[in-house]
Structure formats: C-alpha cells, structure tokens
Image (cartoon, rainbow, N blue to C red):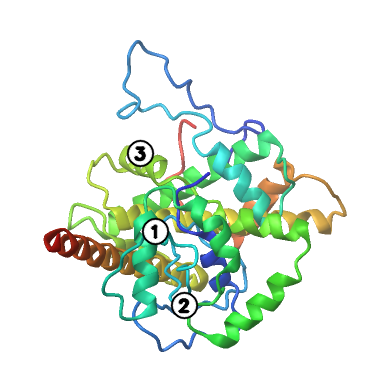
Amino acid sequence: MNQSKDPFEAAYEEQEESPPDSPLAPADFDRRPASPPSAAAPASQNAATAPDDEETDHVNPSDPSPSAPASASAKIKGKSKEEDEDEEEENMEVELAKFPASGDPNKMAKMQTILSQFTEDQMTRYESFRRSALQKATMRRLLVSITGSQKISMPVTIVVCGIAKMFVGELIETARMVMTERNESGPIRPCHIRESYRRLKLEGKVPKRSVPRLFR
Amino acid sequence: MSSSGAAGQSSKPAKAGPSQPSETSTKRKRGMFQKDLQHMMYGFGDDPNPIPESVALVEDIVVEYVTDMVHKAQDIGSKRGKISVEDFLYLIRKDMPKLNRCTELLSMQEELKQARKAFDVDEDKLASLE
C-alpha cells in the first residue's frame, strides 16, 4: 500500500505512556505519550530505524556491513539496503517482531505486552493504522498545484503527509465519538464526519480561511 | 464547507480538455488518496469497508486542510519565496501531538539519510578492496 515509513514503528512510539524523556542519540526522538493515538502519516521512510532492533534477523544475511560498530548502525545499514520505496514487505514481519519503543526497555516491554494481547481484529486494525499513509508522490503533486512552485523539498512533503494523517485520525476519532453519542453503529457516515469537522473547527484544530472559499 | 451533498466538491472530471497534462492541470482528480484513505480510516476506527461517500468527504476535507495550511505557510515564509519545513513546524506549534510527530519524522529521515550515506561509503570500500 504505501511507501511510507513503517507505520508500526511510528505508532508504537506514538502510544508510549511515559513522558518524553529519552535522552538518546539524536535519532531517538521523544516519544510522544500522545493522547490521540494517531500516528501521523509516516510519510518518511521508514522508521525502522528504531534503534533498537534487530532487524538484523530479518535483514538479508547477505548484508555485508563490514564496519558496523553499533548494533544500531548495523541494523540501519541492513535496513537501508531494503530502503527503497517498498520496504513495507520486509517490514511486515519485522515490525511485529521488533521492539516497539526504541531505546527504552520499559516502553518496549510495555508495548510488547500490549501487543501480545491483541486479538486478531485489533491486530489487523493496528497494522492498518501503522502502515497506512498518504502517498508522497501524490502529496507532492498536490503541493505543487497549490503553491504553483515546482520546488517542494522532500522534508516538506514528508511533514505534510504526517500532519495530514494525524488530521485524518482526529477526524475519524471524533466522528466515532459523535456516533457513540448518537448511539449509532456501523460504518461512519458522511453526516458524522461533517459533525466531527464542525467540532474540530470549534476547537480550533482546523486552520481558518481568512478569505471565504469561493467557487467550490 | 460543502453544502453540496456528501461528496462535496464539484471537482471537474480529470480530463475534460484534449490533452491536458495532469501535472499542470488545474483540475483535481477524484480519489487521489482514496485507496490509502480507506486503509487509514480503518486503522483509525472506521469499518473495514468505509462508505465511499465518507472516504470522498474525508479526502475533500484533507485537501482543503492541506491547502489552507500551505497558504498559511506561504504567508509566513513569503520572504523566502519557497516553503520550508520550519514554516510548517511554526504553524503546528500549538498542536503538541502533531509537532512531536513531525520532529520525530524529520529526525528519522535524517537518520536514514546518514545510514544510507554510510552504507554507500562501505560499498565503495568493498568495491575498492576487490
């Protein structure tokens, strides 16, 4: 489905409960104990950089990595081989085996216990959550058409994909809340989404247009 | 907000004119993110098969959201002439989850870049050894 980074990684990190305290290497960023478990669209290349793991098991044994001092770099090197657009395939197995929180054994353990207790349904949903992302190429095309400029750097595309995915998460979660308030069930209907959008606007999470939109 | 029905937007069909290159076309295709959005909606709590109108509506909302964000970022970064990541980070500074997520994505990207660079260097070394 997508070429983005490994959503599982990101999601794991997203859901950490502990405060952002990881004093680790620059790569290891604070895990957000995010209340909305929405992992942003991992538009960037995959995360698998979760510095802890070994993906070395999954990594092709053919990976030379002659000088891989830290296991982290070995892992990363291994990863980078597969790092093309579609690393999803490898990540499929890897992500589930991989430790969820990079670098923090407590978080890792916690995530592991949580994940191990998932039902099959929950697991597929979680997998969709992690792996789904908006296509970078499509997003880039959209950005070009909005700005009119051809020069959209890669980080911008990645960030926008991430922000958009989180926004979708907020929309859908709010829509679900609306449904439970109305005691309805089943797939989400457009009326729920409209109500959820209206609420997000009231909360100020949606940027307001300074000029009213014409010619929709 | 879309007053017109579920699907909202009246975006014109993708190829109305005779050979309009889709890159520069001002028309927006329907269903640009449709497949991805379906999986994403399922991941966030919707049904495994979301209603198509809902998906279309979410897509419209997201495109509008991105458009508004980009316009704001352009206003902020107008001096520079092109949009940079800092502009976006400034825009979402109030929204902690998004901000953290973006910084995480950016740092991961950096890390990957470094890793790839190191990997290439090693490959060269190997090649030279042989």
> What residue sits right under mark 1 in the picture?
A159
- Give whichever of discs 2 and 3 has the lower sequence position: 2
Res. A177 visible in picture? no
Q: What is the three-letter code of the residue carrying label 1?
A: Val
Host chain of mark 2: A
Res. B75 visible in picture? yes
Q: Residue B41: image x %, image y %?
A: 64, 49
User: Which mark is drawn over residue A141?
Assistant: 3
The mark lying in front, picked from 2 and 3, is 2
Residue farthest to the front? B130
Host chain of mark 3: A
Q: How much space separates mark 2 and mark 3, taking CA atoms?
A: 35 Å
Q: Are marks 2 and 3 in contact (CB under 8 Å)?
A: no
Camera-nearest residue between B39 and A8? A8
Camera-nearest residue between A75 and A134? A75
Residues indicated by labels 3 and 1 sit on the same polypeptide chain:
yes
Residue farthest to the top? B18
Host chain of mark 1: A
Q: Residue B31: image x %, image y %?
A: 53, 32
Q: Quadrant of residue A148?
A: top left
User: Which mark is drawn over residue A52?
Assistant: 2
Query: Image point 35% across, 10% down: which residue?
Result: B18
- Of helix, strand and loop, which one carries label 1? helix
